[in-house]
Image (tube, rainbow, N blue to C red):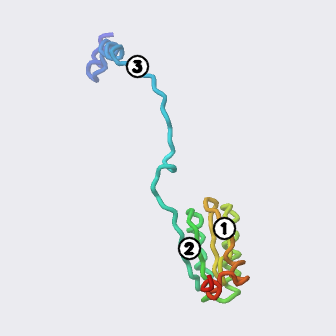
Amino acid sequence: MALNDRFNKLFGLDEDQETLNSENDPVTDTDNKVTTMDNISGSKSQIALFEPRIFSDAKEAAKQLIAGQAVILNFERIDNEQTKRIVDFLSGTLFAIDGSIEEVGTQIFLCTPKSFEINGSLYSNIQNGDLSNDNLNKE
C-alpha cells in the first residue's frame, strides 16, 4: 500500500483530497439545450452565373449545385447541340440532389438545389408577350 500512496502523491492523486473536493462541489441539475448552428448562421445564399462556351464548363456549374448554390446559365453564345448536352448533364446532377431546372428566358435556365423553391414562370409570360417592352410601357 505504501507504494501506491507514493505514486498517488507523486502524480497528485491523493484519495483523501479527491473525496473532500468532490464532496464540496455543488451539484447542478441543468437541462442542456442543443441548438443547431444552421439556423443561427448569417451566411447568405448565393446564385452563380454561368455562360458556358463548351461542354466541360458544365462541370463547374454542377459543383456549385452540389455545394447548395443556385445557378443561372445563359446559353445564347453556344450552339443548340452543346446546350442540350449541358442541360442533360445538369438534369442528371439535379436529379441526384433532388433539385430542379426552369427555363426563365430564351436560352436562360435557372437550376436550383432542393433548398431553393421556384415559384411562377417568367418564360410562359415572355412567350405570351406579357412582359414585352411594349406592354410594360402601356401600364
Q: Which of label 2 and label 3 is nearer to you? A: 3
Q: Amino acid at mark 3?
A: Val
Q: Looking at this view, is 60 or 12 the one in front? A: 60
Looking at this view, name the residue that lies furthest to the front. 139
53 w.r.t. 98: above or below: below
Residue 110 percent location from the top left of the image: 63, 73
In terms of secondary structure, where does tag 1 sit?
A: helix
Q: Provide the residue designation for mark 1.
A: 93
- For marks 1 and 3, give the one nearer the viewer: 3
Q: Is residue 98 above or below residue 136?
A: above
Q: Mark 2 — residue?
A: 60
Nearer the N terminus, badge 1 or badge 3?
Answer: 3
Q: Earlier in the sequence, mark 2 or mark 3?
A: 3
Q: Quadrant of residue 54?
A: bottom right
Distance between the alpha carbons at the discs numbered 1 and 3: 54 Å
Q: Is residue 97 left or right of residue 63?
A: right
- Please name whichever residue, 98 or 39, is drawn nearer the observer in this view of the structure: 39
Q: Quadrant of residue 24?
A: top left
Give the residue number, with chain letter if any, for mark 3.
27
